[in-house]
C-alpha cells in the first residue's frame, strides 16, 4: 500500500524523531548470521534513514546506538559495537575532509568513559559539522541513559546554584540534548513497545510508533508509513482535541 504523499509535506512532518534501533540480533539470527552482522546491517539502515530524513526536510533525528545498560552484553559484542562506532566516525571524518558531509553530527550520553582517541573523534566531528546546523542534525546516543541524563542535569544545576529551587527549564537546559526541541515522535523497531531509558524527559509528549520489522529492515518506505501514521494523529499535550 502506498503512502499518502500529503503526510510527507513539511507542514505535517515531525521536527524531531527519535529512533530505538531494535532487532539487529533477531534480524541476523533469522538469516543464520552472527549478531555482529545484524549490527553492521543496522548501520547501513541508519545511513539510509538519515539520508531520507534529510531529503524530507526533517531537522533533527536521534539514534539510540548504545545504552548505559548495553555494557552488560558479552565483551565480544561490546567490542564489536565500539569498533563499529569508531569506523563509522572515521567514515564521517573522511566525508568531512572531502567536503561531502552535509549533516550536523552530535553525540549525546556520558562520553567521559570513552578513550581519548574516541573522544577526540567525537569532538572533531561535532565541531567540524556544526556549520551544517541549518541542515539535518543527527544525534547519536552512546553510553546514553535517560535517568542518568536527568541525574546529571540535576547535579550540575545544584553545583552551580546550591540554594535555588530547581525548575523544569533548569533541567531541560542541562540535558545532553540541550536546547534541541523535544522529539515529536519516537520510533521503535522489532515490535517491542518499551522506551528502555531513551529520552525519558524529552519524550514526555512524543508520539510512539512501533514498527514490526527489525531495524536492518527499517527502510525509507517503512519510515514513510510511520510518518503517515504520525500525520493522521491529533496531538493534545494534555489538552482537548477540537
Ligand atoms: C538493539 O538490537 C541494537 C543495539 C543495542 C545496538 C544498535 C546499534 C546499531 C544499529 C549500530 C549503530 C552504530 C553506529 C555506528 C552508530 P539488539 O542487538 O538488542 O537486537 P535483538 O533484540 O534482536 O537481539
Image: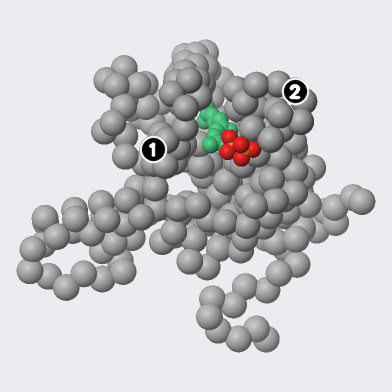
Give the Cα separation between the discs numbered 2 and 1. Answer: 29 Å
Q: Nearer the viewer, mark 2 or mark 1?
A: 2
**Does residue 137 sit above or below 25 in this rendering?**
below
Residue in view at x 16 percent, y 73 percent: 165
Residue 214 quadrant: top right
Ligand 1 under 8 Å from disc 1 Cβ:
no
Q: Quadrant of ligand 1?
A: top right
Residue 162, position as x, y percentages in the image = 8, 63
Report crowding for label 2: few under 14, some 14 to 19, many 20 or more residues within 10 A (C-alpha). Answer: few
Q: Is residue 129 left or right of residue 113?
A: right
Q: Which residue is mark 1?
A: 143
Q: Is residue 99 visible?
A: no
Residue at 21%, 69% (x, y): give it.
166
Kindly indicate whether the residue at mark 1 contacts the one at mark 2 (C-beta within 8 angstroms): no
The image shows residue 203 at horizontal and vertical percentages of 49, 61
The residue sitting at the right extreme is 1
Residue where numbered disc 2 is placed: 32
Amino acid at each position: 500500500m502506498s503512502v499518502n504523499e500529503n503526510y510527507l509535506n513539511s507542514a505535517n512532518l515531525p521536527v524531531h524523531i527519535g529512533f530505538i534501533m531494535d532487532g539487529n540480533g533477531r534480524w541476523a539470527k533469522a538469516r543464520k548470521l552472527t549478531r555482529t552482522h545484524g549490527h553492521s546491517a543496522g548501520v547501513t539502515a541508519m545511513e539510509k534513514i538519515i539520508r531520507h530524513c534529510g531529503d524530507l526536510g526533517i531537522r533533527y533525528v536521534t539514534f539510540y546506538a548504545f545504552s548505559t545498560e548495553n555494557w552488560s552484553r558479552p565483551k565480544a559484542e561490546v567490542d564489536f559495537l565500539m569498533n563499529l562506532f569508531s569506523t563509522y566516525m572515521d567514515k564521517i571524518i573522511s566525508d568531512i575532509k572531502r567536503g561531502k558531509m552535509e549533516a550536523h553530527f552530535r553525540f549525546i550520553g556520558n562520553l567521559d568513559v570513552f578513550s581519548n582517541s574516541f573522544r577526540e573523534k567525537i569532538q572533531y566531528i561535532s565541531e567540524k559539522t556544526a556549520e551544517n546546523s541549518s541542515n539535518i542534525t543527527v544525534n547519536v546516543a552512546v553510553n546514553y541513559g535517560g535517568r542518568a541524563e536527568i541525574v546529571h542535569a540535576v547535579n550540575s544545576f545544584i553545583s552551580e546554584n546550591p540554594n535555588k529551587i530547581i525548575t523544569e527549564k533548569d533541567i531541560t537546559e542541562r540535558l545532553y540534548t540541550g536546547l534541541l526541541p523535544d522529539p515529536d515522535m519516537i520510533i521503535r523497531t522489532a515490535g517491542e513497545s518499551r522506551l528502555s531509558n531513551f529520552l525519558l524527559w524529552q519524550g514526555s509528549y512524543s508520539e510512539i510508533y512501533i514498527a514490526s520489522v527489525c531495524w536492518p529492515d527499517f527502510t525509507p518506505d517503512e519510515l514513510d508509513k510511520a510518518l503517515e501514521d504520525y500525520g493522521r494523529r491529533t496531538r493534545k499535550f494534555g489538552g482537548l482535541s477540537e
